[in-house]
Image: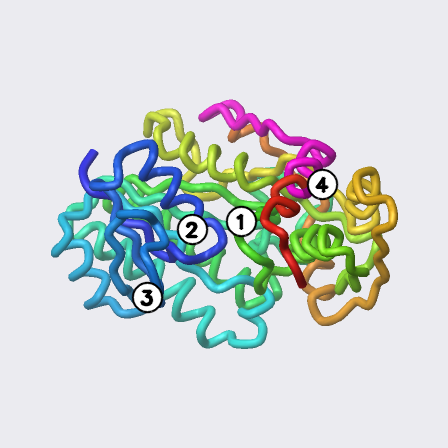
Amino acid sequence: MGTILVTGSLGQIGTELVTLISQKYGKSRIIASDVRVPEHDVFSGVETIKLDVSDSTAVHSAIRDNSITEIFHMAGILSALGERNPDLAFRVNALGTFNVLEAGIKEGVNKVVIPSTIGVFGPETPKDNVPVVTVTRPTTMYGVTKVTAELLSSYYRRKFGLDVRGVRYPGIISYKTPPSAGTTDYAVDMYYHAVAGKKYTCYLKQDTVLPMMYMPDALDSLIKIYEAPANKLRYTIEYNLSAFSFDPMTLHKSISKIIPDFRVDYKPDYRQEIADTWPRTLDTRAAVEDWGFSPRYDLDSMSRDMVKNLREMHVSV
């Protein structure tokens, strides 16, 4: 192992990933980058740099100047924001990934880890037990750019021998990062409102079932595939991940076991159209067989942990 670069380090997953890998591999081996500059020492001693992944020259320079040997490419524009700003989504998600892969080859990077997403699926994808290889014809710019990232990753591994690997994330739930611009972020927002003692208005229909996962399992999975022997990996960044699937009504019931007076109503908006194109359940057997995917949390244990931690944080909305 050499020096690890994390792009998008101030994002939902990047923020927690930097902390985890700095604890696991040492702070001196991590460089955290983002298009934004943190206002304080957010990563407690980990070096931070400003980096716009859509700038090819900047990506090459960051890798070369910091002797980067491995990259966790976490920079990305999520689904809802991507629909509001498709130009930005394309530049960051598609062009940014191309720049990272191209620089990886030219600058001698050993390994690149890139997360994909259930956003690669579309209306023609089966709704249940979706396999790794299936119809990927998304109807959002987010999905289009992430399919592009999957294809680019496979191309660079096959054509140039670059060790590119990653996972297709479902909705990710975390108490450490406030809800942002993802279609599945209603789940995080629901916990925040429940703990704050406020009614929640959900932007998805109550019966919209989607695959989900708790952040500790999401991070553990990324480390497992990062450490897996290359000869065990059948795919690049297309490994399906999901710990469970639920709809907003089921999540409401789980939270109500802890906070009985929590109330939810439903007013679907444009994000419902996005969610309707995604599957309900995924086939994760390839991840289990190839590198030991094994989530620890179910829905109710996640709810208990979310509520406990949010209460300790005294969150408000």
The part of the chain drawn in magenta is: 288-307
Disc nearest the viewer among 4 and 1: 1
- Choose the circle earlier in sequence order: 2 or 3: 2
Which quadrant would the C terminus be assigned to in this image? bottom right
Q: Which amino acid, mark 3?
A: Val
**Which residue is under mark 1?**
176
Earlier along the polypeptide chain: callout 4 or callout 3? Answer: 3
- Disc with the residue nearer the chain's start (2 vs 1): 2
Instruction: Tell me: residue 83, above or below residue 221.
Output: below
Circle 4 is placed at which residue position?
A: 245
Percent position (x, y) of residue 315?
63, 55
Counting residues from the N terminus, which is met first, the one under dot 1 or under dot 3? 3
Is residue 161 visible to us here? no
Residue in view at x 41 percent, y 57 percent: 10
Q: Could you tell me residue 253's position as x and y percent?
A: 84, 43
Q: Does label 4 or label 1 sit earlier along the sequence? A: 1
- The residue depicted at 68 percent of the width and 57 percent of the height is 189
Give whichever of 309, 289 is nearer the camera: 309
Q: Are marks 1 and 3 in contact (CB under 8 Å)?
A: no
Residue bearing mark 3:
37
Residue type indicated by callout 2: Thr
Direction from residue 249 to residue 31 in the image, left or right = left
Q: CA distance from mark 4 to mark 1?
A: 21 Å
* Mark 3 residue element: loop
Residue plotted at (75% across, 43% down):
246
Alpha-carbon span between mark 4 and mark 3: 36 Å
For this rendering, which residue is in front, 283 or 31?
31
Residue type at numbered disc 4: Ser
Q: Are marks 4 and 1 in contact (CB under 8 Å)?
A: no
Q: Which mark is residue 15?
A: 2
Helix, strand, or loop for circle 2? helix
**Residue 41 % position (x, y):** 32, 55
